[in-house]
Image (spheres, grey):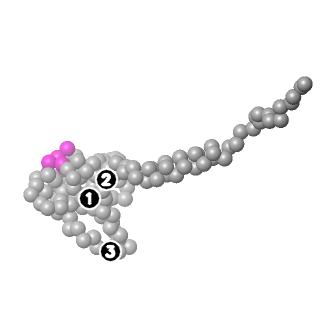
Amino acid sequence: MALKRTTKAEPAFSMASMTDIVFLLLIFFLITSTLVNPNALKLLLPKSSNQVTAKPMVSVSIKHYPAQNRFTYHIDGNQQPVAFGEIEPAVQQKLRNTDDPTISLHVDKSVPMEQVVQVMNIAKRNNYKIILATAPE
């Protein structure tokens, strides 16, 4: 007596559970990526038509001379330029015993971003707030 099997193993695979797992992983990575805090500088970027409530205690200016491809740094509007290596000690001296130390950064339009970021790194190392000054509209 030859009995035939009525149930056969189907070679098909259901992808429904796999798509659910991929969808849950996608949601997980989207949520966790928003929680990651990038290593960024804290900047107070004022709008050119409004005033900022934080009063800068020290002003650092970067002047660009494109003809000589040279940059000069000035502290508190002083006409005498300061070497880049002297900026950090001078700012630390001025902001030594102050609450909420703030630096105002005035930069020519033609100054490359690399020069601006170097001054911002000084502020970050010393936990100073920095305001990037803009011209009024």
Residue plotted at (20% across, 50% down): 126
Along the polypeptide, which appears first: circle 2 or circle 3?
A: 2
Asked if the residues shown at circle 1 and circle 2 are in contact, with their CB atoms under 8 angstroms apart, the answer is: yes
Q: Secondary structure at mark 2?
A: loop
Q: Give the camera-side residue of 99 and 12.
A: 12
**Residue at the left extreme of this rendering:** 97
What stretch of residues is rendered in magenta? 85-90
Relative to 50, 58 lies left or right: left
Along the polypeptide, which appears first: circle 3 or circle 1?
A: 3
Query: Which quadrant of the view contains residue 11?
Result: top right
Determine if the magenta segment contains residue 88: yes
Q: Secondary structure at mark 1?
A: strand
**In the image, which disc is placed on residue 50?**
3
Q: Which residue is mark 1?
A: 130
**In the image, which disc is placed on residue 59?**
none
Percent x, y for residue 56?
20, 64
Percent x, y for residue 31?
46, 53
Along the polypeptide, which appears first: circle 1 or circle 2?
A: 2
Asked if residue 100 is positioned above or below residue 2 in the image, the reply reads below
